[in-house]
Amino acid sequence: MKLDMRKIYNFYPIDPAPSPDDLPTGGDIYYECQECSEVVSSVPRIKSACACGNLSGHGGTLEVRDATRVRVVRGKLK
């Protein structure tokens, strides 16, 4: 089952944009894949991945294959 995070949250880019070498994590921090436009939590508790496979993880850990193709955003419940 695929969950569209944009139906639950409003996302706002973090300004200034963090360096791809030092991506922040946290309960309200999400990564938007620039390749497929999907949003994944920076600390996913359940198995999560974007469509192209750049972002994937579970158990509180996220693997980012290419950090230069990621936009860091903050999520706020609608």
Image (spheres, rainbow, N blue to C red):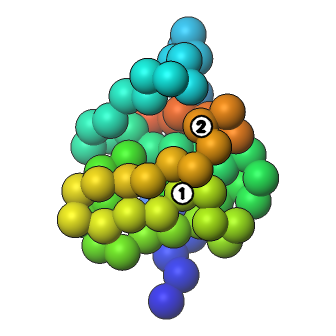
Task: Please provide percent x and percent y for residue 66.
Answer: 63, 43
Residue at the location (32% across, 35% down)?
25
Of the pair 72 and 21, the residue shown nearer to us: 21
Task: Please provide percent x and percent y for residue 52.
Answer: 70, 67
Of the pair 43 and 62, the residue shown nearer to us: 62
Q: Is residue 20 left or right of residue 34?
A: left
Farthest residue in the bottom direction? 1
Q: Can residue 68 be seen in this view?
A: yes
Q: Mark 2 points at which residue?
A: 67
First-in-chain label (2 vs 1): 1
Residue at the location (47% across, 63% down)?
56
Of the pair 20 and 10, the residue shown nearer to us: 20
Q: In this view, does 28 lie above or below 53?
A: above
Q: In this view, does 71 lie above or below 7?
A: above
Q: Mark 1 points at which residue?
A: 55
Farthest residue in the right direction? 35
**Element class at badge 1:** strand
Residue 46 placement: quadrant? bottom left
Pointer 2 local density, CA inside 10 Å: few below 14, some 14–19, many at least 20:
some
Q: In this view, does 3 lie above or below 22?
A: below
Q: Can residue 9 be seen in this view?
A: no
Residue at the location (62% across, 57% down)?
54
